[in-house]
Amino acid sequence: MSSEPSEPVVSPVPDVSNVVERERSFGIGRLCMFHFRNYRELDLTLEPAFTILAGPNAQGKTNFLEAIYLLSTTRLLRSHRDHEAILAGEDKCRVSADLLTGTEVAITLEHGHRKKAWLNGQGLPRAADLMGRLPSVAITIQDLEIVRGEPADRRLFLDLELSGLYPGYLRHFSLYKRALEQRNALLRNAQERAKSGFSVDAWAFEAWEEQLAEHGAAMRQFRRDYLGRLQEPATSTHAFMSGVSERLEVRYEPKDEAADALALRLLLEETRDRDLHRGSTSVGPHRDDVAIEIQGKEARLFGSQGQQRTAVIAIKMATLTLAREILGAPPVLLLDDILSDLDPVRRACLCELVLDQASQAVLTCTEAEAAGATILSRAKVYRVSAGIVSVG
């Protein structure tokens, strides 16, 4: 098995001046859905400021946000299987948006096929090539897993945030993922060959380990730098929302001591025999975690449900603040039924943050009044019922 020539590591803090110049104002002017979730067909103009979707549960409010999230991240909010988003009885679905920048983006999902992405009517080589065109920050009840879930949930949060902000990170992440899959396949192949008394030459591993080390070290640098910058806005937002002197701390937590590409390559070589028994790679950024602590104690284990919820909202709103700083304009903010889960004080705090930090925001709630009088006065309200959107 041969490897492709490795590419030079790019700077962990890439120049985004071209992105800022091209995309001074992020947002959606028009959203269209065809056979997506419970929407048979929808063509809706969005407000440049606030849009509120109100109505009972299980009517399609979250599906609406999920369509925007799909265009932003190329992922679904609530499932890993793309075909689950296709309206029952149909073969495929399509979501598209006219952005405020004049760009049209679209994604199609089809049974038995990979998702396809489109930019101004032209098909893209990979769906991931759409990332960065429509930056967004989504806050949903599922985000509690960032605090109380497994390390994989926190890594996913980091990977999505960084991939949407930095093309360089997305590149390193994609190449690392490919190299990891190849090394793991090679490990399993070596296990099978060992049963017959054969072995796999060391050079076959070295080719992939060199790529894992290069791209893995770059990923870790991106992650450290990002969380280092996220700390201050997360801390201040948490203090504002909690109203008490509890310090929130968010930091990167690698699971091995490889400080750079050389150290990681040597560690991969050193752990190769152990990994042969495991059948998988035991070191690298795919094993790392993010420590989230309140007053020095792990929020996952010792935080109350209220503390965990406040910590998650503080972290996600901090990503909005940081993205605005990096990109030069705030991403689209998606709030999915979060307001109803907060007490009146925290709800008022979050509404104030939304007014201060967001440019375009789409909020879902059972009752529009939960958004507060100030947001309501600047928002267009729609009612959602069984996949039908009408003016509220």
Image: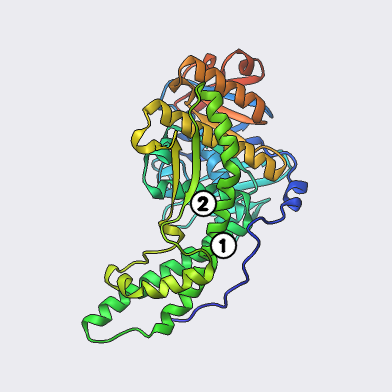
Quarter-wise, where is residue 8 in the image? Answer: bottom right
Number of marks in the image?
A: 2
Percent x, y of residue 383: 52, 20
Q: Give the image location of residue 9, x and y in percent.
A: 62, 67
Q: Amino acid at mark 2?
A: Asp
Q: Pointer 2: residues within 10 angstroms few (<14), some, or many (20+)?
A: some
Q: Position of residue 79 (x, y in %)?
A: 40, 44
Q: Percent x, y for residue 190?
A: 31, 78
Q: Residue at x 53, y 32 (%)?
A: 314
Which three-letter amino acid code belongs to the residue tagged 1? Ala
User: Which residue sits at x=63%, y=56%?
Assistant: 167
Q: What separation in Å lies between label 2 and label 1 (alpha carbons)? A: 13 Å
Q: Judge whether residue 8 can be spotted in this image.
A: yes
Q: What is the secondary structure assignment of the residue under circle 2?
A: helix
Q: Is residue 172 left or right of residue 102?
A: left
Vertical arrangement, residue 178 with respect to residue 388, above or below: below
Residue 199: image quadrant is: bottom left
- On residue 159, the disc is 2
Q: Which mark is residue 218?
A: 1
For label 1, the SS is: helix
Among all residues in the image, which is located at the extreme right?
21
Q: Is residue 240 above or below residue 301?
A: above
Q: Is residue 134 left or right of residue 185?
A: right
The residue lying at 34 percent from left, 37 percent from top is: 301
